[in-house]
Amino acid sequence: MKIIVRNAPPRAVWALEKAGIHPLLAQLYAARGVLDPSELDAALAHLLPPSSMKGTQEAARLLADAMSQDKKLCIVADYDCDGATACAVAVRGLRLLGAQHVDYIVPDRVQDGYGLTAPISQRVKASGADVLITVDNGIASFEGVVTARALGLQVLVTDHHLCASINGTPALPEADVIVNPNQPGCNFQSKSIAGVGVMFYVLLALRAELRQRGAFAARSPASPAPDGSIPPDTRPVEPKLDALLPLVALGTVADVVRLDANNRRLVAQGLKRVRAGMLPPGLASLFTASSRDAAVATTFDFGFALGPRINAAGRLSDMTLGIECLLTDDPNRALELAKTLDSINRERREIEGNMREQALLVAESLYEDTAEAPPAICVFDADFHEGVVGIVASRIKDKLHRPAFVFAPSGATGHGHELKGSGRSITGFHLRDALDLVAKRHPGVLLRFGGHAMAAGCTIAEDHFDTFQQALAEVAREWLDAATLLRRLDTDGPLKPEYRRVDLVDALHHEVWGQGFAAPTFSEEVDVLSQRLVGEKHLQLKLKHRGEPVDGIWFGHTEPLPARVKLAFRLDADSWRGERKVRFLVEAAELP
């Protein structure tokens, strides 16, 4: 492990401090690329305009026309947290804007597979819908879109995933309208917006279109009639869409997209409303079920408490449970669903734990006769559960610092001849592009694939597992050098002793951190005064930092530390007998 200190440009730090930002926050922001205080303004007015996202205006007209003709709309969701929140935002938002007939369908991970398939399109048609709207999927659903349009459905694809490629040229499904910032010709600056964010932007554009059509009550008094009376304006008042922002924030954080300035604004606005108690009953109940306090909600709550409970439904059960939890306005029903999701998540953790142990054994057997792990790891076992392969791949990636794929038998085919795999990558290895190269070099091996730089999925024939394993390792050997394969942790360097305060810890927790805008991690040499195991798997520490004692804990670590060591740590406030004290949460150690 190599601990690296991020560079905080002095001029940027100075500009941020001059704007009144605390010196510690100024350093942290500058080290993450913030050069101007205006980038930190989370006001909704600073969001990128909906008109800058290709397809939003056409989508708004399609939806406005459909609503005026009383057509039935059906959302086709995805079975992860981004897809679930995008579906809830779509249903709630369309109803707020006056749509009378809005329903949804969410594919089953095992039975249906990913995205808009032909059978899903047929189900949408059978439901009586006229317009099919995808959220967080559809950009590679060529067959599903063709089937839907052949059945007479209008198709609006909203997605954020990368487009498919045919002979090096981006290919798009033949939908009526596509809204995706990653489609060719789209100049929307936030390419990392989540699927829920894309749907939120479509709703913003739809509201503007309805406003232009005169759908909402005038802001000024109506003009008098010839007899001098003022006729009542029966049109609805223009609805506010900010009530959807807590859901947008949850889906954005849970999908681990890069928190650029626009995404940070969306998340900050969502958190602001959650802390003020302005959140739907389902979210409130998820906070309760996970023993978290919504009044002091953080991005960590979204990413590590609420998100996993929503995701668990799609992994092991039916994501309808998660979506219904986000849609219901009945607090009792919401709490019942949240408790069910919590129970499913506990089951998920147990399955994941067993699979992780087995997968690590298989992974480590791949290099038992060599000093280092291969450049890419592929693991398969007939007893693996396809619902948690992505989580297990992430654990292997974290432990071995290698791109990792975990495969399980696919239940969608009704037999075990196809494998469904999920992969996670390390910085410097674009996983989706690697799959694309494997597909070109070995035609027919990849039956389906898609994803992002850091996470991707694919389906292969079981007979082709060895070929895929060797092909991915070959690409990894070509693309990864020794520097990339060296595990490194970027930190914010030493912590001044005057910053070791509970109020600053609370201030840091209040900020928006996440993928691409990492939570503060400090690093420096400390003395280890004492250490002992707690719970058989955590190292509890007494440290001396800058001459003063401080508590520390290293979760999931059991190996003892030397008396003097360089640690990377985050700040936390631990409560004991009513007193709150700063504690170091150790992330890593740089050992000789």
Image: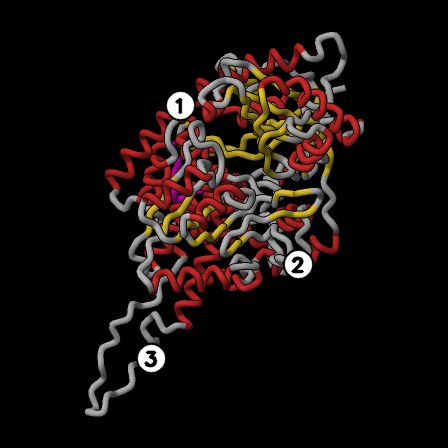
Residue 236 x/y as whole percent: 29, 67
Q: Quadrant of residue 430?
A: top right
Is residue 213 placed above or below 140 in the rendered structure? below
Residue drawn 61% across the image and 50% down it: 182
Q: Amino acid at mark 3?
A: Ser
Tally of marks = 3
Q: Which mark is residue 252?
A: none
Do residues under tags 3 and 2 come within 8 Å of each other at their CB atoms? no
Q: At which x and y percent is residue 149? A: 45, 50
Give the farthest residue toward the front. Answer: 150
Query: Which callout, 2 or 1, points to the residue nearer the camera?
Result: 1
Secondary structure at numbered mark 3: loop
Q: Amino acid at mark 1?
A: Arg
Q: Main secondary structure of the magenta part?
A: loop
Q: Which mark is residue 346?
A: 1
* Residue 295 highlighted magenta (yes or no): yes
Where does the image place residue 388, in percent across and percent down from the top left?
Answer: 49, 24
Query: Gap in Å between the C-alphas at discs 2 and 1?
Result: 44 Å
Numbered label attached to residue 220: 3
In reply to whether residue 537 is colored magenta, the answer given is no
> Residue at left 43%, top 61%?
62
Q: Provide the residue span drawn in magenta.
A: 290-298
Q: Is residue 306 visible?
A: yes
Which label's residue is closer to the chain start, 2 or 1? 2
Quadrant of the rendering where the C terminus is positioned: top right
Q: Which residue is mark 2?
A: 36
Name the residue furthest top: 369
Q: Depth check: give the residue in front, 310 or 456.
A: 456
Q: Residue at x 36, y 48 (%)?
A: 279
Helix, strand or loop under label 1: helix
